[in-house]
Amino acid sequence: MKIVFSEHALIRIRERKISKLEVYATIQNPQNKDETYRERILVRRNFGPKMLEAVIRIEGGCIIVVSAYYLDRRIYESKI
């Protein structure tokens, strides 16, 4: 499935210094996946000490990246 970045996502990953390759890897092979509101999906993957979360939605046969950010691992692990 084709992966398309929204303008918002492109701005945020640039500001947060997140690699597009890491976002692709997270979407294609997530370690964790949760459905959320407004038909969005949260996908997560570890990259060393960091956990990347990408917010995506499926639309017209494409995966749209809404946003991406690193989670504070201490907060994330306390919720598991």
Image (tube, rainbow, N blue to C red):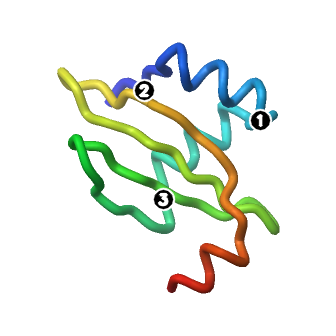
Q: Amino acid at mark 1?
A: Arg
Asked whether 79 or 26 is in front, the reply is 79
Image quarter in which the N terminus is found: top left
Q: Residue at x 56, y 26 (%)?
A: 9
Image coords of residue 35 (percent x, y): 28, 57
- What amino acid does circle 3 point to? Pro
Name the element at disc 1: loop
For marks 1 and 2, the one nearer the N-term is: 2
Give the CA separation, mark 2 to mark 3. 14 Å
Which badge, 1 or 3, is on the more N-terminal residue? 1
Determine which of the numbered discs, if any, sits on residue 16 in the image. Answer: 1
Position of residue 26 relative to residue 19, above or below, is below
- From the image, state whether disc 1 or disc 3 is nearer to you: 1
Q: Which residue is mark 2?
A: 3
As drawn, the residue found furthest toward the top would be 7
Spatial distance from mark 1 to mark 2, Cα to Cα? 20 Å
Label 2 crowd bin: few (<14), some (14–19), many (20+), radius 10 Å: some
